[in-house]
Image (cartoon, rainbow, N blue to C red):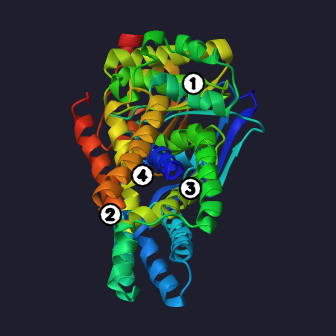
Amino acid sequence: MDKPAILTVEKLRVSFDHNVILSDLSFTVSRGGTVAIIGPNGAGKTALFRSLIGSIPHKGSVTWAPGVRIGYVPQKLGIDRNLSVTLRDFLSFKRSILHLPELVIPEVLRYVHLGEDKLNVPLGGLSGGDLQRALVALALIGNPDVLLFDEPTAGVDLPGEERIYHTLHELQDRYGITLIFISHDLNLVYRYADTVICLNRSLVCFGSPEETLNEDVLDKLYGSKIHHHLHQHE
Amino acid sequence: MSLVAAASGLIGVFALTRRMTLAADAISHIALPGIGIALLLKIDPVIGAAVMLVAGAFVVWALEKKTKISTEAVIGILFTASLAIGSIIIPVEEDLLDALFGEAAIFNSLELALGIPLAIIIIFLVLKYKDKFTLSFISPDIARTSGLSVSKLDLLYLLLFVGTIVLGLKFLGALLMGSLIIVPAAVSRNIARSFSSDLLISLLVAVFSAFVGFVVAAHYGIATGPAIIMVAAGLFFVSVFFSE
């Protein structure tokens, strides 16, 4: 990898009470790269994300390149359905916190292909796919250098998911954003990631999807033989 | 009183967003031991309540920081224990009733001199930090990556919250003041279609309830606090019909 590192993780260890969630995790992410994090449920993927943004206590070191701006797209929002906050309010919160002009809102909506007619819809009234686009739009406010994208587990259909990955890929081509995403869909991983981190409480594999995702690794990750067929996307 | 109600209406909107409706109601109970101790020491009960509430805000903050599942249970136990301790150490039954439900009194000049600036400061800070509070209550992780200190915002909010309780304690008492914070915000949640209208409606409902409750209480010679909450609760039931 010739490009400079935007993130260096060394001997990361996360535990809750006496339960070890992640241990001895070390890897580097290059600037402009697309990194997929895969692993079974409970492998510590979201815990890894949350330790990368300093949300949960951890041991070891997480070092971002100086001045890096992070955009974080969580898996879901813990909100009540009748929350009065509209999409416009939601985007305006971050816009005003970062002291940015009004016009960034239509701009980020265009990036994620979300119509301005949705601006007055309360967050609880948005469909799963639209809410996810809204979260990506929010993360894009302030021109982040890196986007951490936690795949939603509910409320987004497959075509919707395809579209969002396509959008993220476009943004990356255009602005050189580093993308680190959690995914359950190996097809998406093959298609969009240049590096894959396989996680099962510790590092199982690290490298390009083509080189690292062999049957042994998938077996080690998911515990049963998964035969992945790439032909439909080649 | 309008200023107190305005502060309550505003602070309540964030309590609902923070999903601390029950904790919000319970937290006001911690004023009771403070009132009891103040009465025993023969000092102004509001001072005792204020000291206990600020201490309580720090306890809740520290507990929540630990992010243990049992936080709610601990808060529940802490505050019902406060209620029990308060009812034991408040010596005169009439004082206990006043502490629980408020009294039909007027603010003395010292209370006005302290209360009015405090109410204005609370309203000012809530409006100044409204965006930061809401983003960090909706998603602490997003707030963190937007450069906010979630923990400091939490503490600031809890302090503003207990500050508002202190303001209304004399009229509404420890049991009912939590309701003047939560009920108007719940009314507004049923009607409001945006964040700014949510803040405005909650504020207006709180001020209207306080005003009408006050007038009704004075006219019929009933207790002020319960009258105010009855008006607010009545508005809540009406608002249910407007809810989508």
**Residue A139, x across and y down, in percent:** 57, 28
Do callouts 4 and 2 point to residues on the same chain? yes
Q: Quadrant of the C terminus of chain A?
A: top left
Question: Which comes before the other along the chain, label 3 or label 2?
Answer: 3
Chain under numbered label 1: A
Which label is found at residue A194?
Answer: 1
Q: Are marks 3 and 4 in contact (CB under 8 Å)?
A: no
Chain under numbered label 2: B
**Which residue carries the number 3 mark?**
B160
Residue A104 visible in the shown view: yes
Which label is found at residue B223?
Answer: 2
Amino acid type for the residue under numbered disc 3: Leu
**Which residue carries the number 4 mark?**
B181
Q: Are marks 3 and 2 in contact (CB under 8 Å)?
A: no
Do callouts 3 and 2 point to residues on the same chain? yes
Do callouts 3 and 1 point to residues on the same chain? no
- When asked about the image quadrant of residue A232, the answer is top left
Residue, far right: A66
Dot 4: element: helix
**Residue A68, x across and y down, in percent:** 72, 35
Q: Nearer the viewer, mark 3 or mark 2?
A: 2
